[in-house]
């Protein structure tokens, strides 16, 4: 009723975006945090009504560097355009790409037990050549272009492949470091080695300058914007058919894709003991 009475003051509003899970392109079978999926949500947070701030609740072990960069850039673009401050609240973990997202905020708040950092780049694979040889399986690969079979898990690891992978990772790592330095600036502990993919917990992250303090969403926003601040929770909507358990594809493919996505997701979380 209040909104229909123009002379009554409305309470300050803070939209809250939940960014939970691994970061990647995703698919209809294995949704993940991606720029395309989050764009309508982020746009709505900054453009609907007149929010005094936007809050992000982050719980992510990372994933795609490109999607992390795109999502963070969208948040900053809108925040600067609308002149709206952004606060990030870390739950269990904001590591690797998850911390990339957190750095899109003007301030980062953590729990005493939050895991923060992992400013690095990783490539992980398996080597099956011994298993194949044991079972008499021969790998045959024919390529046009000598790098087409880079890091083939069915062939012995080559020093030149390792060097090539390191060369590919370096510019991504540099872009990550530049983003953190641009966003955190002089708050970073200059005496610490922050960019070797190490992680810190709670107050330790604050001491390193990777976070601004230990605080939780509701009490912190009330302290900043008053006890009457209205938190407007925003979440991703599933496609219409998926709400009823209908993916629109073969059931077997959906189950297989879901299982693979779950394995990949668990591998990311397991790096941090979660």
Image (cartoon, rainbow, N blue to C red):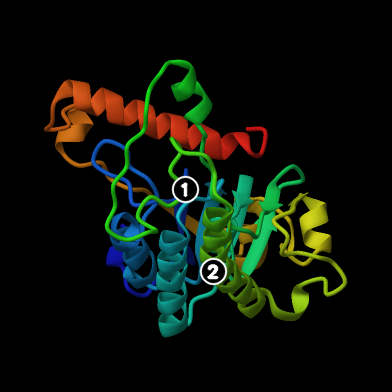
Label 2's element?
A: loop
Residue at 30%, 54% (x, y): give it: 37
The residue drawn where x is 27% and y is 23% is 255
Residue ID for mark 1: 151
Instruction: Decide if residue 227 is in sight here.
Output: no
Taking depth in this image into account, of 177 and 152 the one nearest to the observer is 152
Query: Residue 104 bears which disc, if any?
Result: 2
Q: Position of residue 191 (x, y in %)?
A: 88, 72
How far separated are the C-alphas under marks 2 and 1? 33 Å
**Furthest-top residue in this view:** 135
Q: Quadrant of the C terminus?
A: top right
The answer to which of marks 2 and 1 sits earlier in the sequence is 2
Q: In the image, is residue 81 above or below residue 268? A: below
* Residue 56 seen in the current view: yes
* Nearer to us in this view, 226 or 145: 145
Residue in front for this viewpoint, 267 or 204: 267
């Amino acid at each position: 009723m209040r909104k229909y009475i123009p002379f009554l003051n409305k309470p300050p509003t803070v939209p809250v975006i939940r960014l939970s899970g691994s970061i990647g392109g995703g698919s209809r079978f294995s949704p993940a945090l991606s720029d395309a999926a989050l764009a309508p949500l982020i746009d709505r947070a900054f453009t609907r009504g007149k929010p005094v701030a936007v809050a992000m609740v982050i719980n992510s072990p990372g994933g795609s560097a490109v999607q992390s960069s795109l999502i963070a850039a969208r948040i900053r673009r809108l925040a600067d355009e609308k002149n709206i401050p952004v606060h990030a609240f870390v739950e269990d973990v904001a590591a690797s790409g998850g911390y990339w997202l957190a750095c899109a905020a003007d301030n980062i708040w953590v729990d005493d037990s939050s895991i923060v950092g992992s400013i690095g780049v990783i490539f992980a694979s398996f080597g099956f050549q011994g298993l194949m040889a044991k079972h008499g399986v021969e790998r045959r690969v024919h390529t046009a272009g000598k790098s087409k079979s880079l890091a083939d898990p069915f062939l012995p690891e080559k020093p030149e492949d390792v060097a090539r992978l390191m060369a590919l990772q370096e510019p991504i790592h540099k872009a990550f470091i530049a983003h953190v330095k641009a966003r955190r600036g002089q708050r970073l502990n200059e005496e610490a080695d922050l960019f070797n993919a190490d992680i810190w917990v709670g107050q330790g992250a604050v001491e390193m300058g990777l976070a601004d303090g230990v605080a939780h969403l509701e009490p912190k926003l009330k302290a900043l914007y008053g006890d009457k601040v209205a938190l407007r929770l925003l979440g991703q909507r599933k496609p219409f058919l998926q709400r009823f358990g209908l993916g629109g594809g073969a059931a077997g493919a959906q189950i297989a894709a879901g299982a693979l996505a779950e394995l990949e997701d668990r591998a990311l979380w397991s790096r941090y003991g979660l």
